[in-house]
Image: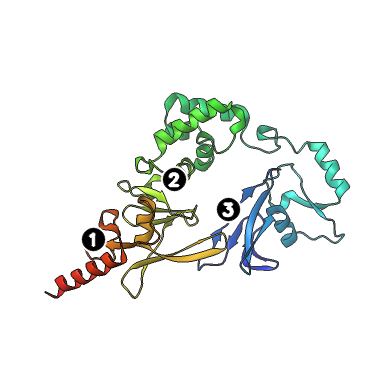
Amino acid sequence: MYKKIKDYPNYEINEDGVIVSLHRKEKIRLKELPTRKGYLQVVLCKDGKKHKKFVHRLVAQTFLDNPKNKPYVNHIDGNKTNNRLINLEWVTASENKIHSNTIHTSRRGSQIKNTKLTDNIVKEILKHFKETESFKEVQNKFSDYKESTLRSIVSGENWKHVLDTEERETLSELYLEKHSNPYTRGITRPAKKIMSSIPEDILYENERYKLVKGFSAYFVTDHGRIFSMFSGRFLKQTTNSEGYKIITLRENCRQKTFKVHRIVLSAFDEYHENLYVNHIDGDRTNNNLDNLEWVTQQQNMQKAYSSTTTETA
């Protein structure tokens, strides 16, 4: 059951600590960001400003009564990422310190109570991946664990402490080489890691992908498609009054509408702020990279006139 977050009417939260945004027609789950101390945070927007909030406090403030006005929220099992309502309680400063000293909440990996994976199991997963060089083989052998969990291990996103840095980097490179799509070569390593987490059947095999300039959660293909990491799908594009394809991108409390042809050429070619993008074949909806070129304003007008003359003739 979801409830509105106090003072933030465009967001809802449930008892498991899942927070969704209501800014669009469909609910979009917010990405949780870990702090240096291991707690999870989200960014909420209000009146054009960004506010970082601890997930455990939002859960407690929304669902957990606090008749004695205790100031702190304690994780009962010591796992700072387990923000389910059943795992939270209001405590005083002294109660919080006593609990912390009792269960040693600074522990990590398998030392955290109720963690399903152990350091030894993770090492076995990594060893099997190193031997087989196949993520599918890892999935088959360790089928009790979610695909996303296994990917986060072999890609080096999580459980980094079980191996030394050099060995961890070697396995991460192996994962990217074997299991990132070949058309993602040339994009940054963080972007490759993001793309590698997307199920391959969603993507178009014969298209190349690059991050949209200025955004960290959107990819554009050389065929003019835009993929959103927020929704996990390709976005629907609309046509403006001039006949161009446009799309609205949202991130970090800002949103902006772009012409798709500029997104494509800016991603795959050197960006030229003062130049125009010309559709070589005259079709303003054909945003294939091969159909786009940078031109000056004068060249753009000449090509537009030439195209109109040809069509009339």
Q: Quadrant of the C terminus?
A: bottom left
Residue type beneath disc 1: Ile
Residue type beneath disc 2: Met
The x, y position of residue 195, in whole percent, is: 44, 45
Q: How far, Cα to Cα, is label 1 from label 2?
A: 30 Å
Q: Viewer-proximal residue, 36 or 265?
A: 265
Residue 2 can be seen, yes or no: no
- How many numbered marks are there? 3
User: Left of 222 or right of it: where is 51?
Assistant: right
Residue at point 35% right, 40% down? 182
Compare marks 1 and 2 and give the one earlier in the sequence.
Answer: 2
Q: Check the image and report above or below for 3 versus 123.
A: below
Residue occupied by mark 3: 31
User: Left of 156 or right of it: where is 38?
Assistant: right
Closer mark to the observer between disc 3 and disc 1:
1
* SS category of the residue bearing label 1: loop
* SS category of the residue bearing label 2: helix
Q: Check the image and report above or below for 167 versus 61.
A: above
User: Left of 125 or right of it: where is 2?
Assistant: right
* SS category of the residue bearing label 3: loop
Residue 168 can be seen, yes or no: yes
Residue occupied by mark 1: 280
Q: How far, Cα to Cα, is label 3 from label 1?
A: 40 Å
Residue 304: which quarter of the image?
A: bottom left
Residue occupied by mark 2: 195
Residue type beneath disc 3: Lys
Q: Viewer-proximal residue, 297 or 126?
A: 297
Q: Check the image and report above or below for 232 versus 144.
A: below
Residue at point 74% right, 57% down? 60
